[in-house]
Image (cartoon, coloured by chain):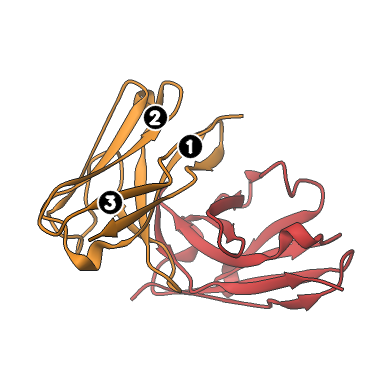
Amino acid sequence: EVQLVESGGGLVKPGGSLRLSCAASGFTFSSYSMNWVRQAPGKGLEWVSSISSSSSSIYYADSVKGRFTISRDNAKNSLYLQMNSLRAEDTAVYYCARDEPFFDYWGQGTPVTVSS
Amino acid sequence: SYELTQPPSVSVSPGQTASITCSGDKLGNKYACWYQQKPGQSPVLVIYEDSKRPSGIPERFSGSNSGNTATLTISGTQAMDEADYYCQAWDSSTVVFGGGTKLTVL
């Protein structure tokens, strides 16, 4: 059974940093591109970043470019999102999703709140 | 940047057919997919590559994509189909979501 479990969310002050993790199981993680998608409270889905299976191709939404860094460790079946210079508008539930290139599996999400 | 436009809300009576549109420039030249999201839950893929259904998705869900518009159609809509629906496509290595449509079954 495919499982994606996010962790690392929490409350952080504006300008602070946070590192999200996504633990994958039930499939050959190293064969798939992965993505981060977020959803602000009461709002729609917003794509954040994608990373190819070998980390050779990485893409970011303009809203996070230069502040967020996506990475993965195929040996640990894990996906990461390093978030720096956080702003109030980054407050959202962050989901990791497997890329087929449609998103066929999603995690349960981890909430991030940026507030003083 | 590329944009996908969905109606904010659609209403349908139980047993009737619901259609949710997603508009974007030359969207028919790209693959569109659709996600269903119920309150407090993660999104679920219901249609991929314009018209394919993942295993476990009921046959009443179907999709099409031509010209500038992709359409999600739910035939014989049930109360359990009440949810937010999002279209999605890729554009130049970036992912674009529509703004979402709240489907109300009343």
Which one is in front, A75 or A36? A36
Have a look at marks 3 and 1 and say if they share a chain.
Answer: yes
In the rendered structure, the answer to whether residue A38 lies left or right of residue B18 reads right
* Classed neighbour count for the residue bearing mark 2: other residues with Cα under 10 Å, few (<14), some (14–19), many (≥20): some
Have a look at marks 3 and 2 and say if they share a chain.
Answer: yes
The kind of residue tagged 1 is Trp
Residue B30's label in the rendered image is: 2
Which label's residue is closer to the chain start, 3 or 2?
3
Q: CA distance from mark 3 to mark 1?
A: 28 Å
In the rendered structure, the answer to whether residue A85 lies left or right of residue B14 reads right
Which label's residue is closer to the chain start, 3 or 1?
3
Q: Secondary structure at mark 3?
A: strand
Q: Do residues under tags 3 and 1 come within 8 Å of each other at their CB atoms?
A: no
Residue B11's label in the rendered image is: 3
Residue B2 in picture, x, y percent from top left: 55, 30
Q: Quadrant of residue B94?
A: top right
Frontmost of labels 3 and 1 is: 3
Q: Secondary structure at mark 1?
A: strand
> Disc 2 is attached to a residue of which chain?
B
Have a look at marks 1 and 2 and say if they share a chain.
Answer: yes
Q: Please tell me the colour of chain A.
A: red
Q: Do residues under tags 1 and 2 come within 8 Å of each other at their CB atoms?
A: yes
Q: Secondary structure at mark 2?
A: loop
Determine the residue positioned at 41% across, 21% down. B26
Determine the residue positioned at 34% across, 28% down. B69
